[in-house]
Amino acid sequence: MRRRVIGAALAAGLLLSACSGISGRMRADAPTEEELIVIGLSQVGAESDWRVANSESMKAVFTEDRGYRLLFDDARQKQENQISAIRKFIQQQVDYIVLMPISETGWDSVLQEAWRAGIPVILVDRMVDKSYDNLYTAHVGSDFLQEGKLAADWMETRRRDEEGPVYVIHIQGTQGSTAQLGRTRALEAALERNGNWTLLAQLDGDFTQAKTYEAMTVCLGELPPGQEIDIVYCENDNEAFGAIQALEENGYICGEGGVDIISFDATRNCLTSCLEGKIALAVECNPLLGPKVEEVIQTLEAGGTPDKHTYAEEQCFTREDLSESFIAERKY
């Protein structure tokens, strides 16, 4: 599998680093050029706080001191850039390709090229279409449908005794991405179950604060004067920040007695807004996936077969679950 021989010292001299949150292996002495495991990583971009934290996690794990050479490529939210990066990694004969796919489809040719080159592909965060199952080795990320179900359950519990209409605005993430598909599916199922819930608008926020603010501002301007809004379901934190800005500029109260803002990711800034009462529910999506990706690679290095899917541990937060000290200690 490997394109260069890994010295025995690499396997023997690696130590667990639990206190830093980076699992896996650490050399006591500096590895030689020939001993480094070369990883080509294609990241979606830096469109959100979550994405930045995810990139930092990867860079913290895959260092030369730990026995790796990381070739990091920022696709600037364009799939064609990711495809070009993967083809370059194949030409460079990397040992592993780590891909954060911007969407689930469109990977046929390039994944086949990696497979023919004998380079394992590890998916991180989002998934690819099931038709590509034999073309990637493992996936490390989140169960986005389950995240959406947790949010829907909370909303249904909170609105259980309401007989009147419940007005919802839905702000979607990047179209076709696994996070968007799963979180959207969960909300749409909740809307079908609850006959008194009304979807006022479904907007494309593309997981960014700026685009959400613009889309939400236009939407609010088109609604009837005085239109009640009960829930704004945002598919990540940055969308929640953009929605809150637009809502408040248009005279809406976010929080108790006003609009329930639902957010996904639960980064530190989101939890601060939740503690302040502006965000009603923050559903965690853990970006610190570097250690779990390393576990997959080290399983392969040892000749083992990793789990096809590895999901991060996650939870939900409301204002009552939080404190300033908890947020301050959070790693992202």
Image (spheres, grey):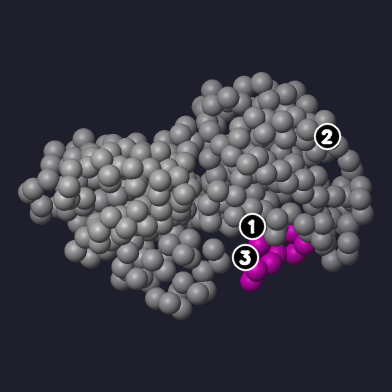
Looking at the rendered structure, the kind of residue marked 2 is Gln
- Name the residue rendered at 34%, 47% in the picture: 217
User: In the image, is 285 to the left or to the right of 115?
Assistant: left
Q: Residue 311, relative to residue 79: is it above or below?
A: below
Looking at the rendered structure, the kind of residue marked 3 is Gly
User: In the image, is 281 to the left or to the right of 227?
Assistant: right
Residue 324 appears at what percent x and percent y?
43, 77
Q: Crowdedness of circle 1 by 10 Å Cα count: few (<14), some, many (20+)? A: many
Earlier residue among tags 1 and 2: 1
Q: Which mark is on residue 57?
A: 1
Residue 123 appears at what percent x and percent y?
61, 39
Q: Residue 110, relative to residue 189: is it above or below?
A: above
Q: Which mark is on residue 21?
A: 3
Query: Cα distance, mark 1 to mark 3?
Result: 9 Å
- Name the residue rendered at 48%, 65% in the picture: 268
Q: Is residue 22 magenta?
A: yes
Q: Does dot 2 land on a helix, a strand or a loop?
A: loop
Query: Cα distance, mark 1 to mark 2?
Result: 24 Å
Query: Cα distance, mark 2 to mark 3?
Result: 30 Å
Looking at the rendered structure, the kind of residue marked 1 is Ser
Bounds of the magenta span?
A: 15-26
Q: Does dot 1 land on a helix, a strand or a loop?
A: helix
Q: Residue 81, relative to residue 10: is it above or below?
A: above
Report whether residue 246 is seen. Answer: yes
Residue 184 appears at what percent x and percent y?
36, 38
Which residue bears the numbered disc 2?
93
Front of the two marks 2 and 3? 2
- Name the residue rendered at 80%, 45% in the picture: 38
Check the picture and name the quadrant holding the N terminus.
Answer: top right
Residue 10 lies in quadrant: bottom right
Earlier residue among tags 2 and 3: 3
